[in-house]
Each structure stands twice: as C-alpha cells, then as structure tokens.
Image: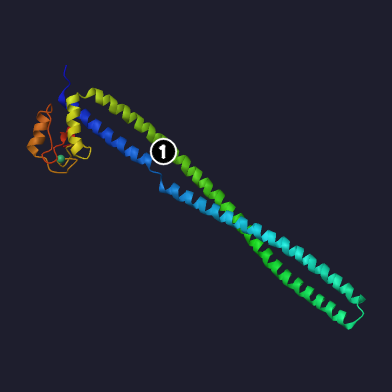
C-alpha cells in the first residue's frame, strides 16, 4: 500500500529539521567557548610571570651570595690591615695601611647597601611568587571546571547528534526516493532548506512571503498533494491544523 502523501510530506519536514539540527550541532561542536579560551590565556600569562619572577629570584640569590662573600673578604682585609697598623714602623707604610683601611671600610659600607637592596628585591620576588602561585592555582581550578562542563555538554551534543543521524537514516528509508530527490533539488538551490512550514500568520517559514488563503484552504482540503511556495518554490507543509 502506498503511503499517504501527507505522511511523506510530514516526514520530509522532520527530515529537514533533523538535517538543520545536525548542522547546528556540528557547528557547536567545532567551536571552543570563548570563556575557556580566556581562562587558558590567563593561566599562561600567570605562568609566564611566575617563570620570570623565579628566574629574577635566582639571579638575586646568586648576587646575594657574591656580595656576602665579597663582604667577608672586605671584613677580613680590614682586620688584616688593622693588625698591620700596629706593626708598621714608618710614616709611609702607616699612611698606606690607613688607606687600605679606608678603602676596606668604604667597600664594606657600599656592599652592605647593595646587599640590603638585593635582600629587598628577594623579599619582593618571594611575595610575588607566592601571589602568582595562588592565582595560578585558582585559575587552573576554574579552567579544569570549565573544561569538565564543556566536555559534559559536548558529550550530550554528540549523543544528540547520533540520535538525529539515526533518525535521518530511518526517514531516508521511509521517504520514497522520488520525494527525497525532489527535496534535494530544491534544498540545493535554497540554502539547504527544501521544506517550509505555513506559519500562523499564513506566511512561508523560509521566505516569509504571504501564502494565498485559497492555497491554504486547498492544502487543508486536499493534503495528499505537494504544494510549493509561490515565492521560494519550497515544499509547503502544515504542521498543526489548529495553528492556522
Ligand atoms: Zn517561501
């Protein structure tokens, strides 16, 4: 027994909806949310700052060690010069040793000043590192939560797409080939949309042009016939009689 044309038309409509929904899901599955992109950016910015500050700290610590060693050297030189001072016997040597002592004292003072500046830098570095590590941890947690949510949504969308593909395949078996062919002929020329619905306001859902009332009456009276929109030539379908 031949299937009623109205059933075929209604299946064509379902077929059309499945195709559009599959396309929409494909687009969604391809796009990576901006919120995740921006979180990833934040994480990498903080990681960069953390890395930079850690290497600054390394340099400062190496400088600290150098200055401390130099300070020790200056202090021991000062001690040596001071004890030398007791042993010198002439004025010339005495002045030379005094100069050595002055120089050592000056160096000690300068080195201590530099050392203080380095220690302040180290303190700043350590404080910043602590702050960066804290922010990094927070952002990473936020990111992994967002990724988890995204993957859950993605899983749902993939499942939905699977079901729609299944439905599409079944409809392809149900709809006689000549109607499928006709559908694709129209869809090819009309942005992939071959079937349109008669809206409540008696317009075509695809091109929004008014449909003649006589045509709508005819469609209701004799539903086992293919009607097309006079403007866009798409196959017209009345989804729910009570709507119009
Ligand atoms: Zn139309």
Q: In this orientation, does residue 194 appear?
A: no
In the figure, 11 relative to 206: above or below?
above
Position in image of residue 85 (x %, y %): 89, 76
- Name, please, the residue furthest toward the top: 1
Element type where label 1 sits in the image: helix
Where on the picture, by quarter, is residue 23? top left
**Image quarter for ligand 1:** top left
Percent from the top left, x then y, of residue 31?
38, 43
Question: Residue 196: percent from the left, percent from the top?
Answer: 19, 37
Question: Is 240 left or right of 114, judged from the image as shown?
Answer: left
Residue at 76% x, 63% y is 69
Q: Nearer the viewer, residue 66 or 112?
A: 66
Would you place residue 154 above or below residue 93 in this image? above
Q: Does residue 97 sit above or below 205 in this rendering?
A: below
Colour style of the rendered protein structure: rainbow
Residue at coordinates 9% horizontally, 29% vertically from top-left?
A: 221
Closer-to-camera residue (150/239)? 150
- Badge 1: few (under 14), some or many (20 or more) residues near its Cα, within 10 Å? few
Quarter of the image containing the N terminus?
A: top left
Q: In the image, what residue occupies the spot 25% across and 23% down?
A: 173
Indicate the quadrant containing the C terminus: top left, top right, bottom left or bottom right.
Answer: top left
User: Is residue 169 visible to the viewer in this orientation of the structure?
Assistant: yes
Specify the quadrant of the image occupied by residue 187: top left
- Say if disc 1 is inside 8 Å of ligand 1: no
Q: Residue at x 17, y 25 (%)?
A: 178
Residue identifier under label 1: 153
């Amino acid at each position: 027994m031949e299937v009623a044309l109205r059933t075929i038309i209604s299946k064509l409509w379902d077929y059309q909806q499945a195709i559009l929904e599959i396309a929409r899901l494909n687009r969604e599955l391809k796009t990576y949310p901006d919120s995740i992109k921006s979180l990833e950016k934040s994480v990498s910015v903080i990681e960069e700052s953390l890395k930079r500050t850690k290497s600054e700290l390394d340099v400062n610590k190496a400088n600290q060690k150098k200055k401390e060693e130099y300070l020790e050297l200056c202090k021991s030189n000062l001690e040596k010069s001071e004890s030398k001072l007791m042993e010198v016997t002439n004025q010339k040597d005495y002045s030379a040793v005094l100069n050595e002592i002055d120089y050592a004292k000056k160096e000690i003072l300068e080195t201590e000043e530099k050392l203080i500046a380095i220690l302040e830098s180290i303190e700043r570095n350590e404080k910043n590192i602590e702050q960066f590590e804290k922010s990094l941890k927070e952002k990473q947690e936020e990111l992994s939560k967002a990724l988890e949510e995204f993957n859950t949504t993605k899983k749902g969308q993939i499942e939905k797409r699977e079901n729609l593909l299944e439905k599409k395949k079944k409809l392809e078996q149900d709809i006689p080939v000549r109607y499928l062919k006709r559908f694709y002929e129209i869809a090819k020329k009309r942005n992939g949309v071959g079937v349109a619905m008669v809206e409540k306001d008696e317009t075509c859902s695809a091109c929004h042009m008014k449909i003649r009332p006589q045509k709508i009456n005819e469609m209701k009276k004799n539903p086992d016939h293919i009607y097309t929109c006079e403007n866009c030539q798409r196959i017209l379908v009345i989804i729910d009689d009570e709507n119009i």
